[in-house]
Amino acid sequence: VIAHSMLDSPIIGFYVKDKLGQALFGDNTHLSYMENPVVCEDGDRLVAEFTFLMPRLAAGDYSVSVAIANGSQQDHVQHHWIHDAIYFKSESTSVASGLIGIPMSNIDFNNFR
């Protein structure tokens, strides 16, 4: 993000959406930085990096929407929102059921007779 004004409590976030536009998951920087916001001046460049274990997505088309706001989760001013900023395709065949699959660390199955 390149700031075009001073932001005293910027929030950068994203949503991953399915082909119907339903938000499957997303997050933002607010909770991690609400006690110590990354203040920026006009012209500053902000970078937010989200590291997570990607859920398994059913085969199909998806998009990522991104946004920047200033304030808090409950009271903020939206500065910019890019719907469907990035498109990608999942070719997974391992989603058991539902919209997303959770990567299992282990599955135990026993018979106790």
Image (cartoon, rainbow, N blue to C red):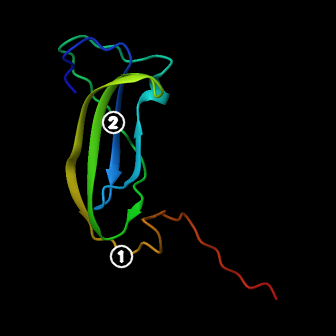
Dividing the picture into quarters, in which one does residue 22 lie?
A: bottom left
85 lies above or below 113 = above
Dividing the picture into quarters, in which one does residue 78 lie?
A: top left
Going by the image, does 111 lie left or right of 14?
right
62 lies above or below 110 = above
Element under disc 1:
loop
Specify the amino acid type for callout 1: Thr
100 lies above or below 47 = below
Element under disc 2:
loop
Quadrant location of the C terminus?
Answer: bottom right
Q: Which mark is residue 1?
A: none
Q: CA distance from mark 1 to mark 2?
A: 28 Å
Q: Nearer the viewer, residue 108 or 69?
A: 69
Q: Nearer the viewer, residue 62 or 40?
A: 62
Q: How many marks?
A: 2
Q: Position of residue 87 (x, y in %)?
A: 20, 54
* Residue at image coords 36%, 12%: 8
Going by the image, does 35 lie left or right of 111?
left
Q: Residues within 10 Å of mark 1 (few under 14, many from 20)?
A: few
Q: Position of residue 81 (x, y in %)?
A: 25, 35
110 lies above or below 52 = below
* Residue at image coords 23%, 44%: 83
> Which badge, 1 or 2, comes first in the chain's sequence?
2
Q: Which residue is mark 2?
A: 49
* Residue at image coords 32%, 32%: 48
Q: Position of residue 62 (x, y in %)?
A: 27, 59
Q: Position of residue 111 (x, y in %)?
A: 74, 85
Q: Residues within 10 Å of mark 2 (few under 14, many from 20)?
A: few
Quadrant location of the N terminus?
Answer: top left
Specify the amino acid type for callout 2: Glu
Q: Which mark is residue 93?
A: 1
* Residue at image coords 70%, 81%: 110
